[in-house]
Image (cartoon, rainbow, N blue to C red):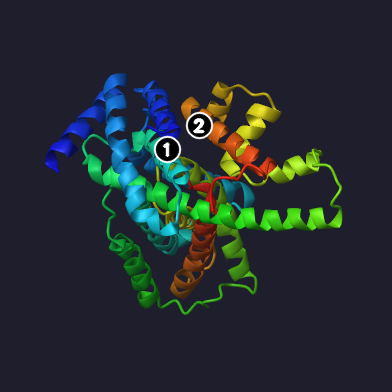
Amino acid sequence: MDTRHIETDSLIHQLAGEAGQGTRALPLAAALPLAGGLALALALLVVILWIGARADLSAHLGATAFKAAGMLLLAAGGLWLAAGAAEPGRTMPTPLVLLPAVLLLLVRALTDTSGLSVFGNSGVSVTDCVTAVLVAASPGLVLLLVVLRGGAPEHPARTGALAGLVAGALGAAAYAIACRNDAGSFLIVWYPLAVALMTAAGALIGRWALRW
Amino acid sequence: MDTREHRWAEAMRAERRGDRAAYERLLGEITPVLRGLVRHRLSLLGLNAAEAEDLVQEALIGLHTKRHTWSPDRPFLPWLHAIARYKLLDGARRLRREARQRIEISLDDLAEVMADPDAEVDRSPIHMERQLATLSPGQRDVVEALALDGESVRTTAQRLDTSEGAIRVTFHRALRKLMAAADPGEAPKGK
């Protein structure tokens, strides 16, 4: 038998010596939703400390609820997909789990008769909104990626993209309490744009951060 | 193969209870399967035997460090197959990249030799840096920790979130590669 095979045998012997040590306190399927909750809390913290809830929040609960609910649905679907992508041999759920969020945003955009502008209330609304979502979402992305590193994703970039999608949607849900742009068209264009940017960032980072 | 699925899943459960013998037997049974996969799937890449065995060892280490991602309520063979596929593809990509790097580095060296044929073999830190650059990022981390910073195997394993066995194998492999790079007379393994 050649020396490389002997080397492999001694490796096996060493690895076997660590039997029983590899267990984790929390399975990934439980850790991921937990990380999602924490990511939302972090995003809310950023929004409240940095911008503050809108002063007229109680007068616009309906519009705010649409924004938050649409983004939370998107985050939930993304978490489901991410859990499937994070561990080998799991059956991937269909991407249709994102459909409820899309439908809700569509319903909101089509039934909105307020006549408010797609560009929001002022010239800087779009950049303010997108920037705020990205900032609020970033701590959550880091957290989700750290948790996903505990898995063994077969497609690091794709899994990272899902982490970005979840973090972006949670950041947007948190930002909803500060956002004064109530048009359905604003919600269906600029919120998803911010989420898409986070998704792309997640894919880029995941490409190397989630390799194992 | 239903019996193999059952036997191996049972051995994985035994591993969780700390049964070293059952786990060692399991890894021993998986290894020839991995060798077969490497030979079958990657022969097109023109790997030599040493590189093929590198990939087998990396797949074993990957299986070991990620064994917590298998859950006893899911079938074992699909999980094993996914781990092996990822590790083999990843390793094949790395070998291609390294082959490219080796060629670029030897061109650099050639230019240096032509500029100053009488120069002694350079042992300066800059040269050392360049030799370390021939290693993969993972190997470099380990060599820097053990050889340059004097860290222990145990602390390095903990810091890099892997096993001590994996660190040792990575270190030995890196040393072999550095020796081959430092002494062109002894033909380095590989293309």
Q: Residue A132, which numbered label?
A: none
Query: Is residue A49 left or right of B61 when viewed as pictured?
Result: right
Q: Earlier in the sequence, mark 1 or mark 2?
A: 1
Q: Image quadrant for the N terminus of chain A?
A: top left
Check the image and report above or below for A71 versus B178.
Answer: below
Name the spot of residue A92 as percent of width and height, x first: 29, 54
Say what amino acid the circle numbered 2 marks. Answer: Val
Displayed quadrant of residue A73? bottom left
Displayed quadrant of residue A31? top left
**Number of numbered tags placed on the structure image:** 2
At 41% from the left and 54% from the top, the residue drawn is A155
Examine the rendering and report whether any part of residue B71 can be seen: yes
Residue underneath mark 2? B169
Q: A110 or B134: nearer the eye?
A: B134
At 66% from the left and 33% from the top, the residue drawn is B144
At 44% from the left and 58% from the top, the residue drawn is B45
Name the spot of residue A77 as percent of width and height, x first: 34, 56
